[in-house]
Image (cartoon, helix red, strand yellow):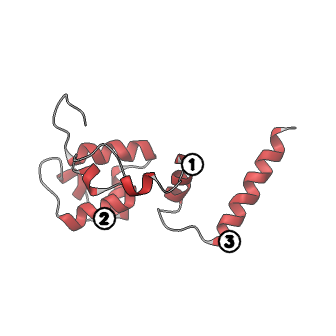
Amino acid sequence: MRNTKMTTIYDRIKEISNKKGVSIDYVNDKAGLSNKAIYGWKKSTPKADNLQKVADVLHVSTDYLLGRTDEMNPAQSNNGLSGFDEEIMMAFDGKPIPDEDKEKLLEFARFLRSQRGK
């Protein structure tokens, strides 16, 4: 954890949102929270269920958001997902990618690879 000053829950959410290329408003909306709820966490403590919703959207643990660990998601860190896989999941709002869409993604990746040599 950062030793320079106390990191708030909001700071952690902002940091991981930036890394994943999404806005706080996007996270707030996808978590189903009231308008600007996350911004209120700069000065207040969220309810456990709301914190879990945000953690789920960002694919991190609540312990990470609370500053208890610097490992974003210990359970997920061993599942073999690459950063690219996580980015693709975020493009699908963190939901499982339908098989039909997976096939389209693979076809497009093959097309891009074939274009490199030209």
* Residue type for callout 2: Lys
* Upstream in sequence: badge 1 or badge 3: 1
Residue at disc 2, secondary structure = helix
Residue lying at the far right of the rendered structure: 118
In this view, 10 is above or below 100: above
* Residue type for callout 1: Phe
Residue 26 pos. (x, y %): 38, 56
Between label 2 and label 1, give the one nearer the viewer: 1
Disc 1 packing (10 Å; few <14; some 14–19; many ≥20): few
The reply to whether dot 3 and dot 2 touch (C-beta < 8 Å) is no
Can you see residue 79? yes
Residue 38 pos. (x, y %): 24, 54
- Residue drawn 27% across and 56% down? 62
* Circle number at residue 84: 1
Label 3 to label 2: alpha-carbon separation: 27 Å
The residue wearing badge 2 is 53
The residue wearing badge 3 is 100
* Upstream in sequence: badge 3 or badge 2: 2
Q: Decide which of 61, 42 is in the foreground and name it.
A: 61
Disc 2 packing (10 Å; few <14; some 14–19; many ≥20): some
Residue 105 pos. (x, y %): 69, 59
Q: Quadrant of the C terminus?
A: top right
